[in-house]
Image: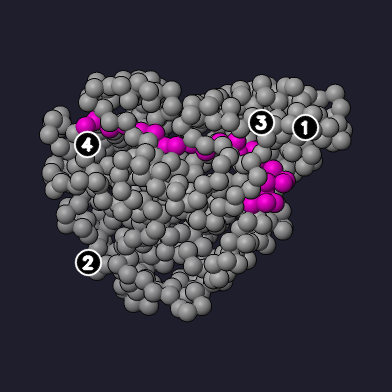
Amino acid sequence: MPSIHRRDFLAASAALSGLALSGVPAFAQTPRRGGTLRVSVDQAVSKLNPLVTRVNPEYLVAELLYSGLTRLKLDMGAEPDLAESWTNSADLTEWTFVLRKGVTFHDGSACTAADVVATFEAILDAKTASPARQNVGPIAKVIAKDDATVVFTLSAPFADLPVTLAYTNAKIVPAAVIKGGLEKLDRQAVGTGPFKLVSFEPERQIVVARNDAYYDKARPYLDKIEVVVFPDVSAEASALIAGDTDLISTTPPTEFGRLQKASGVKALRVASGQFCNVNFGCDQKPFNDVRVRQALALTVDRAAMVDFVTEGFGSAGNDTPLNPAYRFYADLPAKKADIAKAKALLAEAGYPKGLEATLIASDRPGQRTQLAVALREMAKPAGFDIKVETMPHATYLDQVWKKGSFYVGFYNMQATADAIFSLLYTSNAAWNETRWNNAAFDKLVFEARATVDEARRRALYAEAQKLMYDEVPSIIPAFFDLLGARREWVEGYQLHPRGAVFRLDHVSLGAGAPKRG
């Protein structure tokens, strides 16, 4: 993989999307108010509670209905949301956030510092099982100084707090709801977001309408948004081409070419740190032997994997979750396939005649199965006999995710290096799927999190990446460009490199948009 600097990557990302990174659409015009946007997603929206959402369609709906203290800009920086400003102590262990005044939840109750405190106490409670627990930073205590001021005391210095508080699951919910039981949010939405819930049919359609009490009186521009579930990605693309829908939040490479050629459709593409990986259960045979993991990694032709899995809309990976999109990316030597060395390692590990294993892949998105099939074929010459088993995504989430020992994962880019490491790879990660539990890696990540000095922090993250590169808790062969599409009448929409951020409150409908009730 050629050396690419982060600034070049972000510039390329902007060029691919045809838009600036400032968060403002190029050649922006005054948005029109009104109309109904119909956006399609390829999975059911099973979780409505914003503290426990897990997949992109759920993040999209949660973002419409709820607000966080901060939001992510296109350049991964933080901007105000419910917090209008913030300050920090010199040692970065105390952060003070000042809330907007007069904000109300959808039920009419006031949103105050007490709700922020209650939300973060719920997030940090292991019983809530919120992915945000390990991803909002080293928070030791949250207190309400007054109704409009929240103070976060941290267990260590942490420079990224405003960014990590924009995490997908760190949405603010009412203290009264938390006290009464979060199960209320399984079917209802009590947020402060730009839209209010009208109807919720998880497998078919979710409808939201403008929140007239939203803190920003200019936004949202739309009257209503319909989130329509299309399990069949080909049918989803056809609906957009026909004008039955207005926007596809994400589309696979298999449909992108068709969308590029369609009249009245604008295909969208942006470089990202999104990836599929092959997760190993590092606490179980045979993958508790590092030589087995290293051997399988040496069978991967990464350039071919980019062509096959991303269909050219991506870049090669190096078995760490960071690519040039990340600030602290370390440019390690590109891994190359070496079948002879893979065979030797497998023999050293006690498998001179080869090894059988079943690799499980969800059917959503389809790139998971493509990756599994490609790995099966690439690994055969080294003695790996891999059976690929594909299952419905809901079944995968219930039976395999975080439980299996050999399966294909799929992850969005996170806002920071610490966020992706703490989500997936530290011993206390929210989604510790590999169960690698490497104490040296943990120490490096935790020290980097608490380090203010830029050069020292970069060195620590480089060491952490080198450990992953060497020990291969998972194979990360490729990163995906994000792909989507919109009708030409959809204005103000930009693909976000994070993948789980949508900003539909900035969207409006221009001339030619269909009239919908």
Q: Amino acid at mark 2?
A: Gly
Q: Residue 226: x percent and y percent?
A: 26, 35
Q: Residues within 10 Å of mark 4 (few under 14, many from 20)?
A: many
Q: Secondary structure at mark 3?
A: loop
Q: Position of residue 81 (x, y in %)?
A: 31, 60
Q: Nearer the observer, disc 3 or disc 2? A: 3
Residue ID for mark 1 = 342
Amino acid type, label 4: Val
Q: In this figure, which residue is indicated by the disc labeled 2?
A: 102
Q: Is residue 474 magenta?
A: yes
For marks 4 and 3, give the CA distance.
41 Å
Quarter of the image containing the N terminus? Answer: top right
Q: Earlier in the sequence, mark 4 or mark 2?
A: 2
Residue range (magenta): 465-488
Residues at marks 4 and 2, CA–CA distance in whole angstroms: 31 Å
Numbered mark located on residue 490 in the image: 4
Q: Is residue 514 left or right of residue 100?
A: left
- Comparing 273 with 188, the one in front is 273
373 falls in the magenta region: no
